[in-house]
Structure formats: structure tokens, C-alpha cells
Image (cartoon, rainbow, N blue to C red):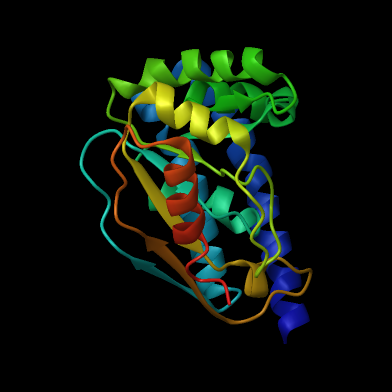
Amino acid sequence: MRVLRSLVFYAVFYGATAGFVVASVIGMVVLPVERFRKLPNAWSAFHRWCVVHILGIAVREEGPRPAGAALYALKHESYFDAIELGMLLKDPVPFAKEELFRLPGWGRAARAYGGIPVMRDAGAHGLRAMLKEARRFIGTGRPLAIFPEGTRIPHGARPPLRSGFAGLYKLLGLPVVPVAIDSGPLYHRWWKRRGTITVRFCEPIPPGLPREEIEARVHTAINALNP
């Protein structure tokens, strides 16, 4: 049954994803930006429906989201974490690897939605570019979302945070909300398993802390669901 559920999920979700991409490419041209953002958010909501009703995976959300702009630092164990952003946060501004913005259709739609390319090997130049992009959204109140470990991490692994995260934290001056997610054991596999994925929003961390402290606190919090 696990194999059958997974095959149905791939056919339904990724088949519909092609339609969402086409609709988003058209929508970003003909719709006001507020209405256009409803399309990617609907894609995220459809993913949640497929996860719950096809895969049999419940999603449990814990903890509040603070009012106002904040930088959300999320654990990243599978594609679930990225696709779910539109369900977990209101009109999030995601940091995503630069290569994704080069994909035909998807890249243009991501830019129009408000994504920020991450130039992982560009050093100080890349940090300045991300900072410039991020500052455009702070006044809007939209939440910024970043995966501070930089890539998908196997469940149970605790690598150090990428150095650029502390730089963004210092220069943006925003509170950080660490988010622990344990999607790996159920979702990061070809044949996905039934069960419950927990998304835990931890206590906000104020701006202005030393680098060692912010990295340590975020690292501990996003790994709260690891064994």
C-alpha cells in the first residue's frame, strides 16, 4: 500500500504542479501581485491535501508565529519543508538556491512571488545581494524564510549553520523564529510512509545577539525534533 499511495501521490501532485506553473507564469503577467500570490499559495495548499489524503501523513503544527516581520530559520529534511512554506507562513519570502531561479517558468514565477536567490559560493558579494533583496520586503511585514543549514539534511544529522545566516541576522536586525521539522523519516524517500510530521515554531530570538550565541540557539532549536 505504501508503494501504491506514493505512486498515486506522484501522479496527482506533480501532474497538477505542471498546471500550477503554467497558471503562475500567466498570472504574474495578467494579475495584480496580491492575487497572483494566491496561485503559488494554492499549490502549497494542494500539496498539503495530497500529503494528508493520499499519503496518509498528518501534519501537526506547534507554537505561535509572532506578529510583524521576522526571519524564520527552518530545519530542512525533505522537499516537504520547502513546498509547505505557503501553508506554514502567510505570503513568505523564501531564500532559495540560485539555480532554481534559472528554471524555465518556475524561476520567473518565484521572482514575481518574492523569492530571494542564495548565491552560496559568492562570499561577501552574495551576502550583499541577498541583503539588498531582503530589505525590500521588511517593510511589507511578510515573513522571510531561510534554511540555515543550506541544503537537505538527513534526519538526525546536525551540521553547523552556513556562515551567511549569521551575517543576514546581524544586518537585517529582525527577530529569528527557529522552526523544527521532522519530515525526513516519512517524506524523504521514494515510498513515503504514513505517520505524523511535526512542525514546531520555537520561541522568537531577539536581534542583536553575538554570532556565537545566535548560531548556537538556532542550531539547538531547529534540531529539537531530532533524536
User: Residue sitting at 29 percent across and 56 percent down?
Assistant: 203
Q: Is residue 9 left or right of residue 191?
A: left
Q: Can you tell which quarter of the image residue 37 is in?
A: top left
Front residue of this view, candidates 58 and 8? 58
- Measuring from the top left, give residue 107's x and y in whole percent: 66, 25
Q: Is residue 64 left or right of residue 220?
A: left
User: Residue sitting at 51 percent across and 27 percent down?
Assistant: 167
**Residue 182 appears in the rendering:** yes
Classify the position of the N terminus by image quarter: bottom right
Classify the position of the C terminus by image quarter: bottom right
Q: Is residue 185 left or right of residue 35?
A: right
Front residue of this view, candidates 147 and 214? 214
Q: With respect to residue 219, does 184 lie above or below?
A: below
User: Residue sitting at 51 percent across and 15 percent down?
Assistant: 29
Front residue of this view, candidates 124 and 17? 124
- Measuring from the top left, give residue 112's x and y in whole percent: 51, 21
Give the total of numbered labels. 0
Determine the residue located farthest toward the left in the rendered image: 67
Q: Can you tell which quarter of the image residue 80 is in?
A: bottom right
Front residue of this view, candidates 144 and 59? 144
Q: With respect to residue 136, does 196 lie above or below?
A: below
**Residue 89 appears in the rendering:** no
Q: With respect to residue 154, does 102 lie above or below?
A: above
